[in-house]
């Protein structure tokens, strides 16, 4: 199928497919005689996996670091991710992303507390860093 049909089947856009290919998440597809990209069901399955992992909060760089594992998640039935932190699994990537999210939540919580305190005091205490 051509890029538009593959993108629609995967729930994304042709631009996203080209981006995933450029970043190494999607193998370069076969080309037709006229040079158009030709995708098959395994490509669509892989794009669906990529989109699910991105929706969970992983980044393109996270996925690129474990690109060789993406096909396992696209199998029917999908292979389970190992919770053990082996260097070849997604576990270290997920744990690092969780740590990043925890740090960002802490930063935003402190920011919110400071802003709430500022409002509660009628704006009398403007922080030094403003």
Image: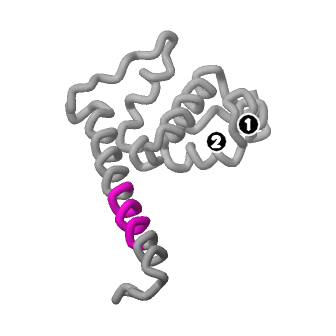
What is the span of residues highlighted in magenta in the rendered image?
105-114
Residue 103 within the segment the image draws in magenta: no
Q: Which mark is residue 17?
A: 2
Q: Residues within 10 Å of mark 2 (few under 14, many from 20)?
A: many
Secondary-structure class at tag 1: helix
Q: Which residue is mark 1?
A: 3
Q: Quadrant of residue 124?
A: bottom left
Quarter holding the C terminus is bottom left
Q: Is residue 19 left or right of residue 71?
A: right
51 in relation to 108, above or below: above
| Residue 78 on image: x %, y % | 46, 16
Q: Position of residue 38 (x, y in %)?
A: 70, 31
Residue appearing at x 39%, y 72% in the figure: 114
- The dominant secondary structure in magenta is helix
The residue under the point 40% across, 73% down is 117
Q: Which image quarter is the N terminus in?
A: top right
The reply to whether the C-beta atoms of the residues labelled 1 and 2 are less than 8 Å apart is: yes
**How many marks are shown on the rendered structure?**
2
Q: SS class of the residue under badge 2?
A: helix
Q: Nearer the viewer, residue 65 or 128?
A: 128
**Way the structure is coloured:** one colour
Distance CA(mark 1)–CA(mark 2): 8 Å
Left/right placement of residue 91 relative to residue 86 reads right
């Amino acid at each position: 199928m051509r890029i538009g049909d593959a993108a629609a089947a995967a729930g994304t856009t042709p631009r996203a497919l080209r981006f995933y290919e450029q970043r190494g998440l999607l193998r370069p597809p076969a080309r037709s005689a006229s040079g158009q990209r030709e995708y098959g069901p395994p490509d669509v399955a892989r794009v669906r996996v990529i989109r699910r992992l991105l929706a969970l909060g992983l980044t393109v760089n996270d996925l690129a670091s474990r690109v060789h594992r993406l096909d396992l998640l696209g199998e029917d039935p999908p292979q389970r991710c190992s919770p053990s932190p082996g260097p070849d699994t997604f576990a270290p990537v997920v744990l690092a992303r969780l740590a990043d999210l925890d740090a960002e939540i802490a930063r935003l919580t402190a920011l919110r507390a400071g802003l709430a305190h500022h409002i509660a005091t009628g704006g009398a205490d403007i922080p030094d860093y403003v």
